Each structure stands twice: as structure tokens, then as C-alpha cells.
Amino acid sequence: MSWLDARQKIQEGTDYTDTVEVPFGDETIELTHRLLTESELYEVEASIDREELMEYQQEDMSDAEQRIRELQEKDDLTAAEQQELKDLARQIQAEQAGIMDSMGEEAFDAFMNAGRTALTPSEEDIDEHFELSTDEQERRFNFVPNTREEMREAIELEMREMVVDQPYPIKLIVGQKAYAESVSLLGDAELDEGNPT
């Protein structure tokens, strides 16, 4: 494989985004996430025990978590499934302390951090933010973005700041999905132990 081929693969991975349905109280909102970078993926890998995680997924994962995963894998949700997703999210919020205990605090924190950093705006999000008045953009971002990249970065920063302390299970749901997609890209290959170089 030439560098040209490698470059194209790298760009495809960098540009790849996916969506995940996240319940916000009485409604479900589709959020966009990117793949984890190499260092972010290794950070999660270093924080989890694969065998324990598989055991957790097979034995300790609550019915609510399992059902949310099933719903997330669907391309389109019916109205009834969207309502079910909302109800399940409320249940998971109530279960979060137990999930942390079952999964292990270090792994739980790693997924939460991955969810925070993997959030990214969709192209539609960027378009909608350019439609805001310049006064509103200045108020939200402390400057007026001029390019799509500036707008993407401004929205990403706002997303990361806002999800730090909020009541919805955004970080856990997005983090687990971004991790699963990133590992899937590698064909679920065993990652080398230790720190990446």
C-alpha cells in the first residue's frame, strides 16, 4: 500500500461520523459523534479489562442498557421505539451508580470522557449555527466564526463544556457507541498493551 492509499484511509477515518439517539427527558435527540483518535482509543483500552468488560456485557449489563444498544443499531426508530428509548434513558440515569460499580469506576470514567470528546456537530448543525445572528454567535462563542472549520470547532468546544455537568446520560451513551465504532474499524483486533508511541 502506498502513502497515497494510506493517506486516503486516514482521511476516511478522520472524516467518519455517525449518529446516536440520546434521550433528553421527554424527547430523543440525534447527536453526531466521530471515531476516537488513536490516543483516545488507547486511553479507554488502558482503563478497561477486556475480559471484565465482556463479562459485564454478558452478565451485568442491565436490560435497559442492552435494549438501548439494540435500538441504537437501528437506522430508523418508530414513534413507539423512540418513546421506549426515552423511558430506558431515565432508567439508566437512575442506574448510573450501579453501572459504575459493575463496570468499574476507571472504565466508567473512560467511557464518559470518550463520550465528551467524541461529540461533534453535524453538517446540519453547522448550517443552522451560521443562520444565527452575528450577535448570537458572538454571545455563544465569544467571536463570530467565518469558516465552516471555525464554526465546527466553536460548536465542539461548546458541546464539550455543556455536557460536563448535566443530568442526561449523554457521555456514557455516546462514549460506548464511539468506542464500539472505533474498535469495529480495527476489526476488533487486539490492541497492543501499554502506551501508544
Image (cartoon, rainbow, N blue to C red):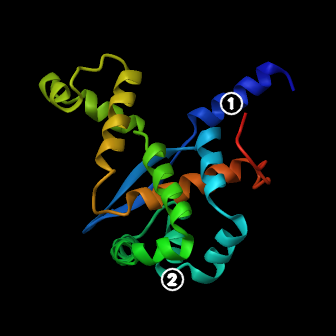
Nearest to N terminus: mark 2 or mark 1: 1
**Residue displayed at 36% across by 43% down:** 160
Left or right of residue 143, residue 171 in this image: right
Which residue, given by chain and number where applicable, does mark 1 sit on?
10
Residue 53 to residue 166: above or below: below
Residue 43 to residue 136: above or below: below
Q: Quadrant of the C terminus?
A: top right
Q: Element under label 2?
A: helix
**Residue displayed at 65% across by 79% down:** 58
Which residue, given by chain and number where applicable, does mark 2 sit on?
63
**Residue displayed at 65% across by 39% down:** 38
Residue 45 in the image: x percent, y percent?
Answer: 66, 54
Residue 61 in the image: x percent, y percent?
Answer: 55, 78
Q: Residues within 10 Å of mark 1 (few under 14, many from 20)?
A: few
Which residue ends up furthest to the right in the rendered image?
A: 1
Residue 95 to residue 14: above or below: below
User: 50 or 136: nearer the eye?
Assistant: 50
